[in-house]
Amino acid sequence: GSEIPWRIPEDFKWFKKTTMGGVLIMGRKTWDSIGRPLPGRRTAVISRSQPSLPDGVDLLDGLEAIDERGYPDPIWICGGAEIYRQALSRCRELYLTLVKREFKGDAFFPSFEDQFQLDSVISDESEFQIRKYLRK
């Protein structure tokens, strides 16, 4: 399925605090897994199909539509794997959670190490790290 195989409340809290007031861009599968707009943030869903979305959630037909909408910064790309792959070349910064466990899965974050370098470790906990990368 399209479920994230871990649940780390501290990571969710960091995500909420950090993205508050921003624009969340996500694919339809990620939208389906969340199921609702997140409070305090504008939400846009990229989809080739025409899913039924609640009022206040924008439907985009591709990444180019982000520019056309004129969204204010910060804009947060929230997944899934295909949206990350398509958006990576447009990003200046990456905020990644490194979960310190192995998981089986069929969707992965794309390779980025040749384009970005580690800037800082924002949080280092027993289960995970939150890392900030900057474009080289």
Image (cartoon, rainbow, N blue to C red):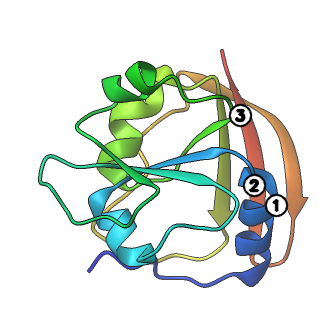
Estimate the spatial distance between the alpha carbons at disc 2 and disc 3, rounded to whole Å: 20 Å
Q: In this view, does 98 lie above or below 113?
A: below
Estimate the spatial distance between the alpha carbons at disc 2 and disc 1, rounded to whole Å: 6 Å
Residue density around tag 1, few if under 14, some if 14–19, many if 20 or more, within 10 Å: few
**In the rendering, at what x and y percent does residue 38 appear?**
59, 67
Front: mark 2 or 3 = 2
User: Along the line of sight, which residue is nearer the eye, 81 or 101?
Assistant: 81
Camera sees residue 68: yes
User: Along the line of sight, which residue is nearer the eye, 55 or 87?
Assistant: 55
- Residue 133 circle label: 3
Mark 3 element type: strand
Q: In this view, does 91 lie above or below 132?
A: above
**In the rendering, at what x and y percent does residue 16 appear?**
74, 64
> Position of 6 compared to 100: left or right?
left
Mark 1 element type: helix
Mark 2 element type: loop
Q: Which residue is drawn at 14% across and 55% down?
A: 50
Q: Give the quarter of the image for residue 35.
A: bottom left
**In the rendering, at what x and y percent does residue 30 appear?**
38, 65
Q: Give the quarter of the image for residue 108.
A: bottom left
Q: Which amino acid does label 3 sit on?
A: Tyr
Counting residues from the start of the chain, the first of labels 1 and 3 encountered is 1
> Position of 54 compared to 29: left or right?
right
- Residue 17 circle label: 1
The N terminus lies in quadrant: bottom left
Q: In the rendered image, which residue does mark 2 sit on?
A: 20
Q: What residue type is labelled 2?
A: Met
Q: Do the residues labelled 2 and 1 touch (CB within 8 Å)?
A: yes
Q: What residue type is labelled 1?
A: Lys
Estimate the spatial distance between the alpha carbons at disc 1 and disc 3, rounded to whole Å: 19 Å
